[in-house]
Amino acid sequence: MKKSNIKKIIVVLACVLLAVILSGIIMITRRSKSQDTKEEITFEEISKEPESSQSQEETTQEETEEETETITYPQPEYDFTTEEVNVAIEGLDREYTFVWVSDLHLVTDHEAGDENGDVRPEYLDAIRKRYEELAVTEDGVHAEDLWPEIIKFINYGDYDGAIFGGDMMDYCSNSNIRIIKEGLDQLHIPYMYVRADHDYGVYYGGVFFTETESRALHKTIDGDEMSHKFWDMGDFIVLGIDNSTKDMPEYYYNMVADVYSRGKPVIMATHVPYESKVDDSLAQLSMQVRNQIYYWSADSEHYKPNDITQKYLNLLYSEDTVVEQVLAGHLHASWDGMMTQQLPEHIFGPAFQGHIGIIHVVPK
């Protein structure tokens, strides 16, 4: 074989070998890049997974802590008398429970030299008499000591809201307002404070200021606006009638009529009760306890309705009333009966005697 042919063969083989080597290098490079890319993707995914897993673990842990971290409220030491009321309403998918407190008649200005300066010295004896003879339970617990126990009772229970039905204080003063507010500020549920004459009253010589100033003081508690005396629970409404010891102003009647026109069942919370058209059991109890007709009626000296109040009462007494239940206090005695053949009324005993009401709103 000629040398020139041998050289040609060697050149061809070298080219083939070089091509093979280059091809191998290219494949290795591509594979290396592919592996690098996969490693980068895998790293990103892994780096995210621990964060996501950690976040989920933290969330789960937080949820678990929230579930297990239940606030424990102290149990009341006082043994209250509870009054149970059941209100059946169509369309409910669960039971609602409310707690009622009224007629505590708190008196705190019973010591001479009160720092707020609300008590006139010449009337201190009269206030002390109210403190010793009215604002105290039969077993000797005064209203100012009972009030913290009431707050414990409410917080310890499982309620959707608390209704304070009037006369929570015996008269308005800086001291009484401050003590009531301190208690209300500790509640962990919504509350409705329906005032009455004693809440706003500046009588008994207990204060130097006017009723206008009294209203201003009450605003420091909860704003004392109608928005705080009205709950729309979706399937029913709880409506508070404020200052019910006086005839109803026309603007108030218009507000009530508007609520009634919404087509929802209504639970009425008032301080002064209403006459029963069914029997005379309420009249007998009222004469026995108060020696007078102590509720809204044409037969009452104190609570004879004017035209606007009567127009409001007609909404209650009508056969097609939207009201399912009336809740009241004021009488200082318990009564459960019917205002009309279709409308029940419950009057709760006074808190100063250790009475607390429990209202169960249940599906019909």
Image: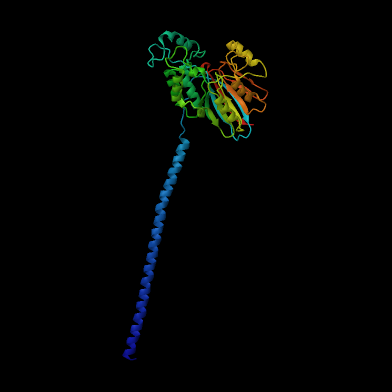
Residue 22 in view in this figure: yes
- Quadrant housing the N terminus: bottom left
Q: Residue at x 42, y 51 (%)?
A: 49
Please provide percent x and percent y for residue 144: 45, 17
Looking at the picture, tell me which residue is in the foreground, 107 or 219: 219
Q: Residue at x 57, y 35 (%)?
A: 234
Residue 76 in view in this figure: no
Please provide percent x and percent y for residue 229: 52, 27
Task: Count every numbered label the image shows and give the total.
Answer: 0
Q: Residue at x 53, y 16 (%)?
A: 353
Q: Left or right? Give the position of 284 relative to 72.
A: right
Please provide percent x and percent y for residue 258: 58, 30
Q: Residue at x 37, y 80 (%)?
A: 16
Looking at the picture, tell me which residue is in the foreground, 168 or 253: 253
Looking at the picture, tell me which residue is in the foreground, 347 or 137: 347
* 91 over 80 or under it: above or below: below
Please provide percent x and percent y for residue 119: 41, 13
Q: Left or right? Give the position of 176 relative to 335.
A: left
Quarter of the figure with residue 326: top right
- Quadrant housing the C terminus: top right
